[in-house]
Image: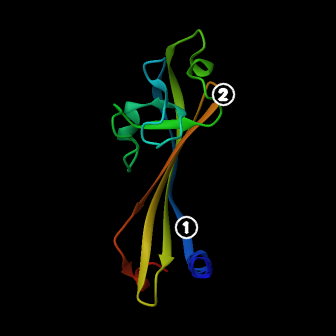
């Protein structure tokens, strides 16, 4: 346990995060039971209400699609019921998606550093906050290229 704490502390001390891009795009969202689901697909044993937004694929760098889905998705903690979002008004609505791409650099040793790309996507759909964040570890780099 002590060794794990030392590793976590050293990573925190030598990590640096830089925002590469931050933008908002407006995309059509099918707010119906066809694209909103109560599912654990892609999340293990935890169930979420999630929305599938195929058009998001053309706007993001990382793959936000869960295996078995027909497009990228976001989930919400705000409700456990699809009908709370759909209500009696299924429709296609234009929704703003905030997409932030960041780079985190971490000193691994005196010669090497690690780089992780982090893409965070968020949208407010009918008052419910949906999100999806992915991390992708890049190949190790020379320490001089990171800091």
Q: Do the residues labelled 1 and 2 touch (CB within 8 Å)?
A: no
The residue under the point 47% across, 43% down is 43
Task: From the image, tell me which residue sits under label 2.
Answer: 127
Structural distance between the alpha carbons of marks 1 and 2: 30 Å
Image position of 59 with respect to 90: above or below: below
Image quadrant containing the N terminus: bottom right
First reached walking from the N terminus: tag 1 or tag 2: 1
The residue under the point 56% across, 22% down is 82
Percent coordinates x, y for residue 3 in the rendering: 57, 82
Q: How crowded is mark 1: few (under 14 residues within 10 Å), some or many (20 or more)?
A: some
Scheme by which the image is coloured? rainbow
Task: From the image, tell me which residue sits under label 1.
Answer: 17
Residue 86 disc label: none
Q: Please tell me whether mark 2 sits on a helix, a strand or a loop.
A: loop
Q: Which residue lies furthest to the bottom in this view?
A: 110
Seen in the image, is 65 located left or right of residue 93? left
The residue under the point 37% across, 78% down is 141
- Nearest the eye: 66 or 107: 66
Q: Residues within 10 Å of mark 2 (few under 14, many from 20)?
A: few
Image position of 111 with respect to 55: above or below: below
Q: Please tell me whether mark 1 sits on a helix, a strand or a loop.
A: strand
Percent coordinates x, y for residue 70 in the rendering: 34, 31
Percent coordinates x, y for residue 36 in the rendering: 49, 24
Tell me how many marks there are: 2
Percent coordinates x, y for residue 12 in the rendering: 60, 75
Image quarter of residue 35: top left
Q: Which residue lies furthest to the top in this view?
A: 88
């Amino acid at each position: 346990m002590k060794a794990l704490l030392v590793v976590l502390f050293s990573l925190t001390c030598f990590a640096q995060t830089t925002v590469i891009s931050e933008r908002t795009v407006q995309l059509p969202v099918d707010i119906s039971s066809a694209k909103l689901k109560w599912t654990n697909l892609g999340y293990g044993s935890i169930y979420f209400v999630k929305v599938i937004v195929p058009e998001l694929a053309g706007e993001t760098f990382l793959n936000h699609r869960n295996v078995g889905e027909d497009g990228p998705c976001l989930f919400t903690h705000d409700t456990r019921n699809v009908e709370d979002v759909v209500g009696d008004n299924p429709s296609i609505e234009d929704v703003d998606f905030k997409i932030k791409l960041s780079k985190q650099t971490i000193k691994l040793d005196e010669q090497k550093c690690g780089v992780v790309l982090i893409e965070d996507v968020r949208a407010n759909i009918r008052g419910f906050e949906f999100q999806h964040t992915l991390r992708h570890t890049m190949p190790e780099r020379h320490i001089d290229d990171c800091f």
